Amino acid sequence: MPGMIPGMPGMIPGMPGMPGMPGMPGMPAMMPGMPGMMPGMMPHAAMQPQAQVRPVPEKPEVLEWPAWLRAGAPCSICGDAGKEGLPHGVICRRRKAKNAVGGCRKGVCWACMGTQPRSSFGMVRTTKEEFESLEDDAWWMHERCMQPSDLRAYFGGEKELADAQAAADAADAAAKESEKPKETEAKKDPIEAEKERVKKMSVKELKAYLDRHNTSHADLFEKPDLVNRALEVCSNSVPEPPPGPAWMTAGDVCRLCGKPQAEDQRGIFCRRRRTDGRIAGCNEAICWRCMKRAPKDSFGKVRCTKEEFEGLGEDAWWMHHHCFEDGDWKDYFGESEPEEDRWLRNPENA
Ligand SMILES: [Zn+2]
Ligand SMILES: [Zn+2]
Ligand SMILES: [Zn+2]
Ligand SMILES: [Zn+2]
């Protein structure tokens, strides 16, 4: 679990104020820079090159320490100014020797501190709890605003800095890894997906597939030839819907209200895959809201809820009553179709 690595305070992107972060009770050894190593202390102050100090500071500014981002002062990233009079982030600023001040002096709110990517923001993060716990010695700067000596001081030494960098690298790698499969699946072209399925089909399934697509296979006897013909069909026809329950996914449009859905599983398609692989149903999408409200006259009486559909797992299907064929009522409701319902579904009687 990222964010729980001991000795790595405030370093893990996206984990502000997680339990186990520094500053929490029972974790005394986890503070960055440890109180004894904090800025403003003599040993570190003495390390700063004296030449950089301006001989005559014209007008000494009054800066508040620690450098909380006060309510009313906007975050340099999102522009949010906070509320309720409480500090809502920190300012990139460190008190150095002889009144010199390090850092770019830009404010960062806690939300941005937690969510900004390492590529633009760097790896050095703090949390409200950590910053608070360091009291008067608390400081934070962007990684890019730190000198090597700042980095060492912040993390408490050369070794601690190296550990912090290694932990940030590991968190990056883990984040990349967990994104990978999602991305490739979402981008998978439906025709390619169908070709993958075809390659795994048995001879019987291949023949059924070709039959469904009105393609002859009478001249073929070897499985590889059947696969090749089926692959040709894939390339030249509308792909079949993937197996499994016919959920709508984000972006699919409900046929009744015309609204594109913002998330997956906000509705379903009228579709049933028969045992021979044939697809029944009109394949129109319907959102859960419309499923509940659609008029009985036009929509029919066969309805389903998300809970029901979900509860049926991989076998879930639903169709409009008027899309039922003989036998579907029995499969759907577990009892024979009443004669009047059967009569209703005949288009001539509707
Ligand atoms: Zn912000
Ligand atoms: Zn900065
Ligand atoms: Zn709808
Ligand atoms: Zn239908």
Image (tube, helix red, strand yellow):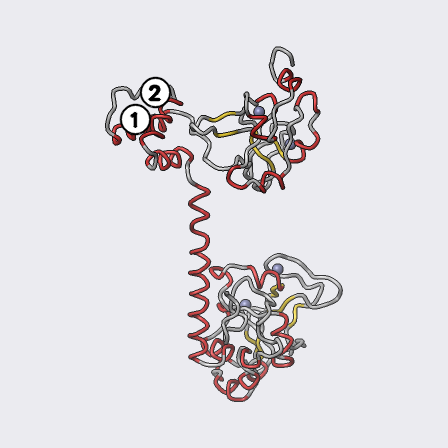
What is the three-letter code of the residue carrying label 1? Arg
The residue lying furthest to the bottom in this view is 42
Disc 1 on helix, strand or loop? Answer: helix
Quarter of the image containing the C terminus? top right
The residue lying furthest to the right in this view is 84
Q: Residues within 10 Å of mark 1 (few under 14, many from 20)?
A: some
In this view, the residue in front, 142 or 319, is 319
Q: Quadrant of residue 185?
A: top left
Q: Residues within 10 Å of mark 2 (few under 14, many from 20)?
A: some
Q: Position of residue 126 (x, y in %)?
A: 57, 70
N-term mark: 1 or 2: 2
What residue is shown with label 1? 229
Q: Quadrant of residue 247?
A: top right
What is the three-letter code of the residue carrying label 2? Thr
Q: Position of residue 205 (x, y in %)?
A: 36, 30
Residue sitting at 44 percent across and 41 percent down? 187
Q: Are marks 1 and 2 in contact (CB under 8 Å)?
A: yes
The answer to whether 44 is drawn above or below residue 1 in the figure is below
Ligand 4 within 8 Å, label 1 CB: no
Residue sitting at 49 percent across and 83 percent down? 48
Instruction: Tell which quarter ligand 2 is in.
Output: bottom right
Disc 2 on helix, strand or loop? Answer: loop
The answer to whether 343 is drawn above or below residue 123 in the figure is above
Question: Disc 1 and disc 2: Cα gap in Å?
Answer: 9 Å
Q: Quadrant of residue 94?
A: bottom right
Residue sitting at 34 percent across and 29 percent down? 204
In this view, the residue in front, 287 or 38, is 287
What residue is shown with label 2? 215
The residue lying furthest to the front in this view is 335
Left or right relative to 122: residue 205: left
Residue sitting at 48 percent across and 30 percent down? 273
